[in-house]
Image (cartoon, helix red, strand yellow):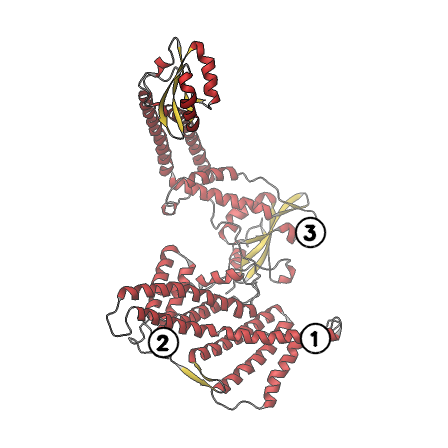
Amino acid sequence: MIEKMKFLSMTGPKADIDRVVNQYLAKYEIHLENAMAQLSQVQNLSPYIQINPYKELLGQAEEFAGLLEHTDKIPLRNLSLEEAAALIDRLGSQMAELNAEREELNTQRKAVVEDLNKISPFLKLPEDIDKLVHYRFIQVRFGRIPKEYYEKFKTYVYENLNAWFYPSHEDEYVWGVYFVPWTRMEEVDAVFSSLHFERVYLKKDYYKGTPQQVYDKLKEELSMIDRNMESCQKEASAILEKESSAILSAREVLSTLSSNFDVRKVAACVKEHQETFYILCGWMTEKDAKSFEKEIENDSKLFCIIEDDRHHVNVKPPTKLKNPKIFKPFEMYVKMYGLPAYNEIDPTIFVALTYSFIFGAMFGDVGQGLILVIGGFILYKVKHMDLAAIIGMAGIFSVFFGFMFGSLFGFEDILPAIWLKPTEAMTAVPGLGNMNTVFVVAIVFGMFLILATMILNIINALRSKDVENIVFSQNAVSGLVFYGALTVTILLFLTGHTIPAAGVLGVMFGIPLILILLKEPLTRIVEKKNPAIEGGKAMFFVQSFFELFEVMLSYLSNTLSFVRIGAFAVSHAAMMGVVLMLAGAEDGGTINWLVIILGNAFVSAMEGLIVGIQVLRLEYYEMFSRFYKGDGREFKPFLKQRKIK
């Protein structure tokens, strides 16, 4: 169902807009339209421009709320704007101090980690670093050299070089220290530089003791910094946790105030007699509009017009769906195709019934259906997933058809079939011989569904006053008469009854086809448009003939598409027969229950997915395409439904 909408235009003194929004409009769902666009004919109209004063506070509140956990379990309480602002300012100061402390600790940590990385390759050095760097006649260089150059160094250079190299660690480099007399320092440094030796500079006033002692001291310092950072984090978390309810409440208040203030974005201003007035316009449901009108009737500062004639409104109404709870999950499928326009039929209930029924017919099994029901509704209860509820509903019909087919987890001999066995039942079709009964029933059922969608199309066309789709198109009265006569004729043929006389068939088939062939000129004649035929007549008739031929092919292809209902019913039974055969359940021997369980799980998952997609395809391509456009606008409430203190 689509809720009825009313268009409202409100005006009052410019300075009074916040009172009106917070006192009245925040109680209702209202889809606001841009007043500048809607009232373009009004003179002296200007946009309402003002900077939102709540944005910055709201951003801070959002930041604090984002640091909280399990916010869905935290209760809210009423806060005034002053209380919310004071809370955010106080928390901002506390968090700023803690953040500054954390930044300082983080800077210290980076320096310690850098020193650890420098000292770690030299842990094997047994000597005090401070002594090494203070030798009187020997210069010490710490660093690393690539392995390939180190090999060349040992082979070709080391023996003739006035230096001693002490390797301490190897990875892709050889880390170590070389000792060189002061007098040969420049020469040796040049040789090592040519071998891509990279120096590591250690702080002389910091590294006291052996590398291992320095390393241990740095690790202790790093641990202390980490403990201090963790303490800061815990302190911040404790502050936020203590104020969690107030933070979320402040965010809610500020979010509401910010949204309400942003009403100015879609408002307009007009100046009359030295005073400036605001103008707001938008859509409310009929029920809300009546309540709103009654509430403001004694407010002298607010003037509101509720428009009943939508011809005076420049924009089409938005669509708000309202369906019973059992059908509401199927709105997901409708919205995937497109939201219905305001004057269209809401197909949600139609989709819910046909989708579930067809799914059950294609996937008829009592046991597997019960699993879909239980699993689907539990998942919907826990996760609130619409798709899970759809699976649960479809599972109910799977159970129903499981009893009709006498199938329980693939076993066909435990339950008696109330109707038939899909793989066994055959029907004699005159002129065609024996055909599988479910195939025949599926085609007949599909023909009735196509007729139903034609009726829905005619209703939609009547609502929009579309003459062509009321009378002349393939899904209008002409198509309904033709396809309805064809359906009745086929049913009479299948049941062995006398087919109507050729004259009656000629009228029932011929006249509708002629109307479909001439739909464009006939529509123009009814709508009193000239000329009746645009362009050359010969080209029109050639084009119309091929279009009629395409229409006839579409009737045939759409009808045959429903064969898949019977095909999947048969294939489901056949696949489960294979599972039972692999489990040894058909030869009277011992049943392998593991194969039964895994086979049922595999068939349920694979075929359930395929059937779900195939049914959705039938909905969209064979049914929706006949009556549904789905070009509606979604009803989006601009304001939060909450009154501010």
- Residue in front for this viewpoint, 248 or 187: 187
The amino acid beneath tag 2 is Phe
Q: Earlier in the sequence, mark 3 or mark 2?
A: 3
Q: Is residue 63 above or below residue 287?
A: above
Q: Secondary structure at mark 1?
A: helix
Which mark identifies residue 213?
none
What residue is rendered at 54% in x and 38% in y?
A: 53
Q: Which residue is mark 1?
A: 542
What residue is rendered at 33% in x and 27% in y?
A: 223
Q: Which residue is mark 3?
A: 42
Q: Is residue 95 above or below residue 309?
A: above
Marks 3/2: CA–CA distance: 68 Å
Instruction: Please indicate, yes or no, whether residue 638 appears anywhere in the rendered image.
Output: yes
Which mark identifies residue 405?
2
Residue mark closest to the camera, 1 vs 3: 1
Q: Quadrant of residue 139?
A: top left
- Residue in front for this viewpoint, 583 or 638: 583
